[in-house]
Amino acid sequence: MSVIDALEKPGLRERVFAGPPHWANDRIEPFDEEGFRLAQPFVIEQYWSGQQSINVFDVVGTQHPDYAGRSWLEFLREGKRMGINLDLQRENPDYYLEDRPKLPGMYYRSVDGSRWFVAEDGNHRTAIARFMFHEMGRSMLHGVTVIKYKTDQRAMEVAAAVSGLVDERGLRVRLETCRTKLSREDTGGWMREEWRLDFEWTDLRRGVSERLAVEEVERRVEALRRQSRWRGWMGWFRRSGPHHE
């Protein structure tokens, strides 16, 4: 293709507007910062890599408040730096296709799954990559920086159950997570850390604390629930039993 032909060919944005993909009107989801803050004490694995490959269509949202809530098509049309990035994409499409680490970088984060959110930088380029790769029949974006967290879902459910008992029954207990590092692996360009998660159960009436495994707290919660049900049944029996005058 000659330089003149390249300049006359419609750009990516014009081609997308002429025939948007089926997902073009999907909304860019906001990263749940408050949910992540609450989940952090329950993180049992953290993985970081500066040279990762991800499926760009698994990128569903962003932590940037100005971009979340727009559709991908709206962002392609209205992104404040979209024009500049589209010009760079047209001049150097290999940036999106090459395997080596991206410079400038593209950053993503994920919690408990394969859904990715744009982190510090890369919002406009992510949208461009999605539309560009849709045209090309590609999916994998290489050389990006990721950080991925895995939480202990069972421990979160147990902690929520204890919180419920505290609210419902006025249980005089404080429950806090305790993490113990089990391992760290790293070489050039990646790192993985793992933790064991336990609880510190404090009886506020007696001022006594115990360190308990998740399973032990789970059994204690079930025992308290059985006790509560038994008291409820006994109360009903007393109210419903025969009355003598």
Image (tube, helix red, strand yellow):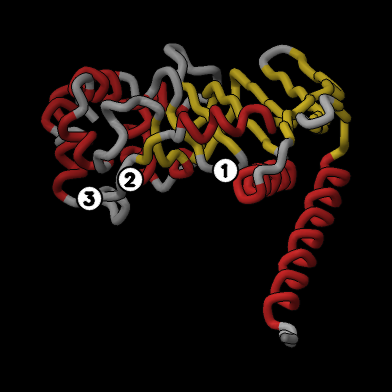
Chain-order first, disc 1 or disc 3 = 3
Secondary structure at numbered mark 3: loop
Give amino acid for label 2. Glu
Secondary structure at numbered mark 2: helix
- What separation in Å lies between label 1 and label 3 (alpha carbons)? 25 Å
Q: Circle 2 is placed at which residue position?
A: 135
- Which residue is nearer to you in this view: 112 or 50? 112
How far across and down, in percent of the image, does residue 240 sit?
69, 82
Q: Which residue is drawn at 41% across and 21% down?
A: 95
How far across and down, in percent of the image, does residue 111 sit?
58, 36
Camera-side mark, 2 or 1: 1
Residue 114, label in figure: 1
Dot 2 alpha-carbon crowd within 10 angstroms: few under 14, some 14 to 19, many 20 or more: few
Q: Which residue is drawn at 68% across and 37% down?
A: 151
Q: Circle 3 is placed at which residue position?
A: 20
- Please state if 136 lies on the left or on the right of 18 as rendered: right
